[in-house]
Amino acid sequence: MGTRYLLLALLISVLFGCKEKTKEAVHEPTLVEVEKPKKLPKELFKIVEFAGVSLSDSIDINSQIGFRTIDRNETLNSVDMDKAIELYKTRIKSGKGDVYPIFEVDGFEDVVVTTVSKGYGGKIRGIFLINRNSLEIKKAEFEHMAESEGYGASIAGSPFENQFVGATIHFEKNPFGLNQNGKILLEGVQTIDGISGATTTSRLTIKMVNDELKKYKAYFASE
């Protein structure tokens, strides 16, 4: 009888030990918090679309776009995306500010820069895609935010914009001149035909491009 009880106790002890080991072998799942990709601002998509680059919220933006700035003192800095977009929005909206954003794309060989100035009845805006090595303008677009419709709106048309494409920027002299109805109103390396009936807007646009692009001289002169 004593042996029977002893064997029963030993069996219970073995079963209990196996149960405890089974409990120890079961681990609670480890929860790993995965950070969601940061949603890219719509302004950035507009800039890279202009440059012919495709982006998605899932990529590492810094491997595709370089964010730089230059100020009135020709000081160059690298900034993050949020700062660059903030400066871009301020510049496009008000035209004010002493720091100008630069967006480097396509392996950082091409750059996107902006120009803003007061036009006839509203602001004139320009955006340019420029090859950093050759200083060739690869693409140009303009926008005239006139207080009244019709004032110089044609600067936003391809016939006017395409005249800038293929031109090389010269910083020591005016890159562009203006021919208005057969008369040279502004002297420059490459002459642009102004828009008929919009002499003031044509002149102010060419002046804006010449003056504003020169603000990036130190950037293009750097490595």
Image: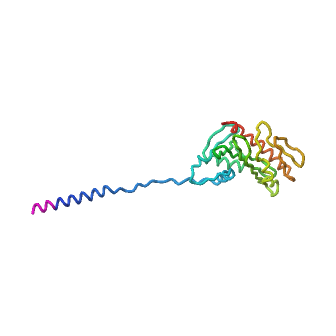
Residue 66 x/y as whole percent:
62, 44
Q: Is residue 73 visible?
A: no
* Coloring scheme used: rainbow
Q: Is residue 125 left or right of residue 195?
A: left
Quadrant in the picture for residue 177: top right
Q: Give the quadrant of the N terminus.
A: bottom left
Question: Is-magenta flag for residue 3?
Answer: yes
**Magenta-drawn stretch contains 185:** no
Q: What is the x, y in percent for residue 187? A: 84, 41
Which secondary structure dominates the residues rendered in magenta?
helix
Q: Position of residue 140 (x, y in %)?
A: 74, 49
Residue reaching furthest to the right: 182
Q: Position of residue 76 (x, y in %)?
A: 65, 38
Q: Residue at x 45, y 53 (%)?
A: 32
Give the quarter of the figure containing the C terminus. top right
Q: Is residue 160 visible?
A: yes
Query: Looking at the image, how many numbered discs can be counted on the residues?
Result: 0
Residue at x 63%, y 53% (from the top left corner) = 54
Camera-side residue of 120 and 144: 144
**Magenta stretch, residue numbers:** 1-7
